[in-house]
Amino acid sequence: MKYLFLFVFIYSNNSVSFCQAADRMVVDKVKNDTILPEVTVQAFNTRLQWKAVPAAVATITSKEINRYANTSLVPILNTVPGVRMEERSPASYRLSVRGSLLRSPFGVRNVKVYWNDIPLTDGGGNTYLNLIDMNQLTGAEIIKGPSASLYGAGTGGTLLLRSDLAFSNTSRNSYSVGATSGSYGLFAERISWQYNGKYFASSLQQTHQQSDGYREQSATRKDAIKWQAAWQLKKQQIQFLIFYTDLFYQTPGGITMAQMLANPKLSRQPAGILPGSLQQQAAIYNKTIFGGIHHEIAVGDLFIIKSFITGNNTSFKNPFITNYEKRTEDNLGAGTNLIFRKKTVRTDFQWMNGVEWLYNHSSINDFGNRAGVPDTVQFKDNIFINQWFAFSQMQYTVDDKWNVTAGLSLNNQSYKYKRLTDPNSVYVNKNIHAVLTPRFAVSYRINRDISLYALAAKGFSLPALAEVRPSDGNFYGDLLAEYGWNYEAGIKGELLSQRLQFDVSSYFFTLENAIVRRNNAAGAEYFVNAGTIKQNGIEALIKFQLLKKTTPFISGIHVWSSYSYQPYRFTNYQQTSNNYSGNELTGVPRNVWLSGIDIETRKGMYANLSLNSTSALPLTDANDAYADAYQLLQIKTGYRCKQTEKQLDIFVGIDNLLNKNYSLGNDINAAGKRYYNPASGRNIFAGFIYHF
């Protein structure tokens, strides 16, 4: 890290004249902006102001992405009420919306993910979100709860990622370089080139990130390259998205409370005849190439057709405690959406109809693991998955006051499975019959600044490949899909001359056939259906522009706060002789409160401070073990100087400033009470970004 500080110091001295000139430019061009920026939401293809959308949709801007260290999406997504992102070990992400983490020991399940309207979620229901570098994104939207209609099956919500490209009447090339270094061997660098023209725009970006990790067996390395382009003609636009990521990260595994208190840096220790993570060199190796094309064309004045095709290949290796898995995944996808839109002076009518199809073929081979080296074959499996849904959605706006949305999707999934190493084996077919999932929502604008909304939506979540064929090596063809109804109401808008933004909602969701993770004695996972869950809660978000007018020194002070109240419970859940009805939902904290302050000066200095307070959460379905509450304080400060089309940003920050001992990602229902994956203590990062 000291070398980065030295580099930044030398670079800064070589740029003194640039920054001095930039200071004068900043003083001259600072806007007296006393209101918070208005946001247009693209979810459900609404293109409405955020306060008019009849749904719980959270937006994340590029400014909010830059609030933290540019090495992880975790703190960014955790600012959204109802959203919890965990990191069991560096680069091992889990994402839940309103409690859907119950199904995700690793990866992202039951949350559909799109990038520039191209699905990243595969036909098996899994999303490798850790393949994406956050520096590749310019913003995101999160739909909370069942999204039905346009996004198909799912009860956990939808994440819409964006990396925008702009067209320009004047052709120009721009470049960006950056680096970040920090505690525990953290180092990240990125280089990008972007071209903007009248009809064509293109971006090429290379990123690298590595870390030694806080714990034993927790090193990580990620190399990624992404190319994105957009080509526009008179009535149509074509977008291309291609990336390749080579990801490696070690998996330290869970430890017990006694081990965490004695030495939180420990990896999973040997127990009986089972070796530990260090001895087995437990890790993930993931090489994925992804490509997608999105096409949009206007047909006459009333119709628009949006279509996509996508394909990707993943080579996946996982030396684990009890085996060494090698997996090859081939994925294809296609979809189309016909949009009819008619506007009059008083009304705006939109009707969308479309279909989406996703296909996954996985070849899964399990071997014995001899200290990180594959040994004899245990079994080889072949799985084919087809998933499709058709949808229809109407949206009607009257006098810019009433907005009514009604949608419906028909969802279907089928599996074909065969164990190749079993003599005379035949394919086992499983088909989940088509299920209709309706959604109805309405919003009413009380006045120009405040809106009320209410909705009812059915969620239907298919079991993912990693749940039907989990790490214990068995095939669970009898696993049922989750389903349930969500009822929600909220109020959102602006006050105090648009300096205060607020969004408050209350929801009532009953989930049937909930899928719950179990572990066998060796620590390998499997999944079962767990009866009924009540997921009722309250969410609130406020953003406030503290200064009414800029001062000679301060150009802006923004404070923000988000709160989630999640008293989720099992209502009908019995496993053999154990009755868990009435227990708190595993892995979900009852209260999560985040707040922060962002300060900017007219001279280019800035500071971002945030506090995450998370209450205790149950680690088992029996509620006989809890993870302690924690408070996570983070700060980032820096100096940003601009001149014409150049910008230099130098920053330094501290994560876990209070040096709390906490676990950011717990192993729920873990065998041997190995629940805890301790996060790092106080750590520092510093870096720079230069755009020219």
Image: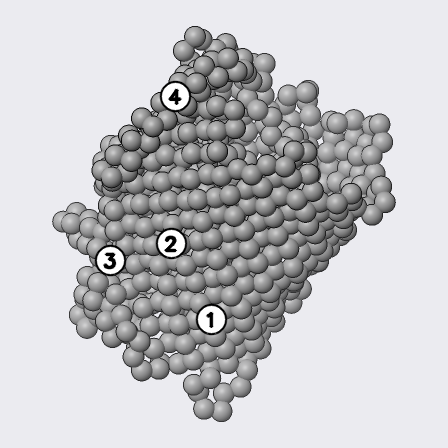
Instruction: Tell us which disc is closer to us: 4 or 1.
Output: 4
Q: Which amino acid does label 1 sit on?
A: Thr
Is residue 45 toward the left or the right of residue 378 in the image?
Answer: right
Helix, strand or loop under label 3: loop
| Cα distance in 3D space between marks 2 and 1 | 19 Å
Q: What residue type is labelled 4?
A: Ser
Q: Are marks 4 and 3 in contact (CB under 8 Å)?
A: no
| Cα distance in 3D space between marks 3 and 2 | 16 Å
| Cα distance in 3D space between marks 4 and 1 | 54 Å
Q: Position of residue 553 (x, y in %)?
A: 41, 11
Residue 18 in which image quadrant: top left
Residue under label 4, please give it.
17
Image vertical order of residue 120 relative to residue 470, above or below: above
Pick whichever of labels 4 and 1 is earlier in the sequence.
4
Residue under label 1, please give it.
328
Q: How many C-alpha atoms fall within 10 Å of the one at disc 1: few (<14), some, or many (≥20)?
A: some
Instruction: Tell us which disc is closer to us: 3 or 2.
Output: 2
Residue under label 2, please give it.
222
Q: Position of residue 626 (x, y in %)?
A: 29, 47
Pick whichever of labels 4 and 2 is earlier in the sequence.
4
| Cα distance in 3D space between marks 4 and 2 | 36 Å
